Image (cartoon, rainbow, N blue to C red):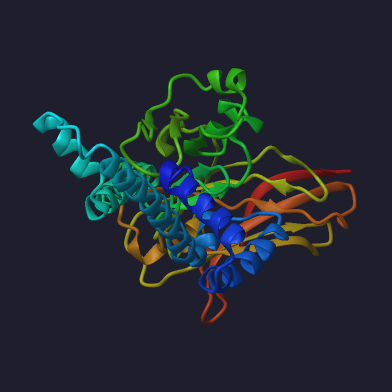
């Protein structure tokens, strides 16, 4: 409570002490609400201030009782002093101060104003901050203005909530990977939570952030930094050329990229680069299969391009789309050499649209 108003908090505590000491029936009635509630709250490991909100009216009643008791004692003492000094004339200013400090109503109003000043100022300040966009909102708007549909953004846990058109990935500290790793994964922006112990030295390796969003006493929200990984445009990213066509030449697999090796129980990073030559009538699904020498599938993924955030029906002639179709390889897959196949199909009819069958993406070695 001292964070909201120091004087009021101490007045509430003093009022509770007064209620315990004098034990009037009204005091006991109010304590019958406060004491059980406080005992209940002490049994909870994590207590937020909002959990104590129901107690505030009762605590303020006791704070008011304390103020009244003190002022009544003070005014009574002042009256006794005034009677004793009636025979002596005091200068007008002194007499005015005596009358003012002996006026019960004036003292009550003055003390009430003093107790309410800090919490009122704090409330006005908080409401002013709430009327402004938070750091999260500003960072989200910054990203929305600089990204394309389906683009990947790395977020540490509980940093931003982005619109569905972007693919938010991550959930762990950004410093677990080097900046080059993010570039290779096609991740253009990395959002870091500066309020956490992210490791200053490791974060310095990322260079200067493209943007910072700080509270600076002017807004709510965490302090965030956004790093531009320098991921190249899809048109100049390295890849293995393909040239395979789908939908009677409406789409060309311009190329693909994967490491060619994966450990069972982990994920094979796979980037497909699609180029549209003419509009597609439907929204198609991309499939990726890892098959053994006999053609049996040992791992599979069926997801629309960019996880549905940029459907194929919205592709325009000339569009080049980087589509990350990372494939999870189960632990049960035996070590050995497998082939990686890909293509598209209409999910409503399960009809493939590959012009020459599944597209061969080369060999993948699975290890333990």
Give me the residue at 41% from left, 63% from top: 311
Determine whether, in the image, residue 318 is placed left or right of residue 311.
left
In this view, the residue farthest toward the left is 92
Outermost residue, front side: 87
Residue 5 appears in the picture as rendered: no
**Left or right placement of residue 303 versus residue 331 in this view:** left
Residue at x 42% of width, y 55% of height? 69
Tag count in the figure? 0
Place of residue 140 in the rendered image (x, y in percent of width and height, measured from the top left): 37, 46
Closest to the observer, 98 or 126? 98
Above or below for 291 versus 186: below
The residue positioned 40% from the left and 35% from the top of the image is 233
Question: Dividing the image into 4 quarters, which one contains the C terminus?
Answer: top right
Question: Quick check: 107 above or below 81?
Answer: below
Residue 213 in view: yes
Q: Position of residue 158 (x, y in %)?
A: 54, 49
Farthest-out residue, bottom: 349
């Amino acid at each position: 409570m001292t964070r909201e108003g120091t004087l009021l908090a101490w007045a509430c505590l003093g009022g509770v002490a007064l209620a315990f000491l004098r034990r009037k029936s009204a005091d006991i009635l109010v304590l019958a609400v406060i004491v059980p509630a406080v005992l209940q709250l002490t049994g909870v490991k994590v207590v937020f201030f909002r959990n104590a909100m129901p107690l505030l009216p009762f605590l303020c009643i006791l704070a008011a009782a304390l103020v009244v008791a003190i002022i009544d004692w003070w005014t009574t003492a002042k009256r006794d002093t005034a009677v004793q000094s009636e025979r002596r004339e005091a200068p007008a200013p002194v007499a005015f101060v005596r009358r003012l400090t002996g006026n019960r109503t004036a003292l009550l109003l003055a003390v009430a104003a003093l107790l309410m000043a800090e919490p009122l100022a704090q409330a006005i300040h908080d409401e002013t901050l709430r009327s402004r966009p938070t750091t999260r909102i500003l960072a989200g708007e910054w990203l929305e203005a600089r990204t394309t549909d389906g683009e990947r953004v790395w977020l540490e846990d509980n940093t931003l909530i982005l619109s569905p058109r972007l693919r938010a990935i991550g959930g762990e500290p950004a410093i677990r990977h080097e900046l080059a790793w993010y570039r290779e994964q096609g991740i253009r922006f990395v959002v870091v939570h500066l309020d956490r112990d992210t490791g200053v030295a490791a974060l310095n390796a990322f260079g200067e952030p493209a943007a910072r969003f700080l509270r600076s006493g002017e807004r709510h929200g965490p302090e965030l930094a956004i790093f531009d990984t320098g991921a190249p445009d899809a048109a100049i990213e390295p890849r293995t050329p393909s040239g395979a066509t789908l939908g009677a030449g409406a789409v060309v697999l311009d190329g693909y990229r994967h490491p060619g090796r994966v450990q069972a129980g982990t994920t094979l990073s796979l980037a497909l680069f699609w180029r549209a030559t003419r509009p597609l009538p439907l929204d198609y699904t991309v499939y990726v299969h890892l098959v053994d020498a006999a053609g049996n599938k040992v791992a599979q993924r069926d997801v629309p391009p960019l996880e549905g955030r940029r459907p194929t029906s919205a592709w325009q002639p000339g569009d080049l789309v980087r589509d990350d179709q990372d494939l999870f390889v189960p632990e049960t897959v035996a070590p050995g050499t497998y082939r990686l196949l890909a293509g598209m199909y209409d999910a409503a009819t399960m009809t493939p649209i590959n012009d020459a069958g599944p597209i061969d993406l080369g060999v993948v070695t699975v290890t333990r």
